[in-house]
Amino acid sequence: MFKGFTQSRLSWGILLLSGMALELAALFFQYVMKLDPCIMCIYQRVAVLGLVLAGVIGLLAPTVWLVRVLAAAVWAISAGWGLKLAYELDQMQTNPNPFATCSFMPDFPKWMPLHEWLPSVFMPTGMCTDVPWTFLNVTMAQWMIVIFVGFLAVLLLFLLPLLSRQR
């Protein structure tokens, strides 16, 4: 049964929609709640876009083994990178070091300058050490750790049936 779910458009659509919901939440925090995103927040947005991309890839042909594997690889890389970034941001906020600061300009590849193409979404305007928001005494960086761990946990559930070829 679970194998059938991993090969359904519904499962990949849920991944796509959850990533889009996180992106919309980030924009809500930025533009409605007036919380300025730091460079690490912007990089986490890119990691979440990777989850959206994984959902799109999986939606294209969810019954094709190679497409599922490619989508799962993008999912794993995006969630793993996002977790690393969220952890690093949490460390900057909980153990501030005056000699370790984050950059003010994103270091996107020259062939993909997202901060120039869409500065309203990808231009950092905040400081990494600021903690402007908490919910249940948990910072946004810590919530993102939980979220990325959740994405990785769900991916693990997907891997066994995902990697078995349909006969």
Image (cartoon, grey):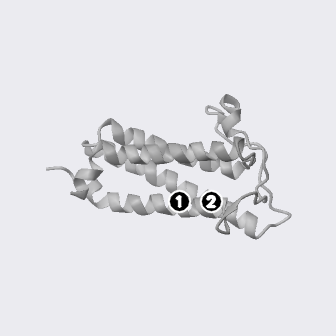
Give the vertical position of 23 relative to 141 (above or below): above
Q: Please, what secondary structure does the residue beneath circle 2 have?
A: helix
Q: Are marks 2 and 1 in contact (CB under 8 Å)?
A: yes
Query: Which percent across, then down, holds residue 5?
Result: 27, 52
Side of 19 relative to 109 (left or right): left
Query: Which percent across, then down, holds residue 115?
Result: 69, 35
Q: Pointer 2: what residue?
A: 86
Task: Judge the density around disc 2: few (<14), some (14-19), many (≥20) Cα neighbours within 10 Å.
Answer: many
Outermost residue on the top side: it is 117
Q: Closer to the camera: disc 2 or disc 1? A: 1
Quarter of the N terminus within the rendering: bottom left
Give the vertical position of 93 relative to 36 (above or below): below
Residue 34, visible in the rendered structure: yes
Give the vertical position of 95 relative to 119 (above or below): below
**Which residue occupies 41% across, 43% down?**
55
Query: Which percent across, then down, holds residue 64?
Result: 25, 42
Outermost residue on the right side: it is 98
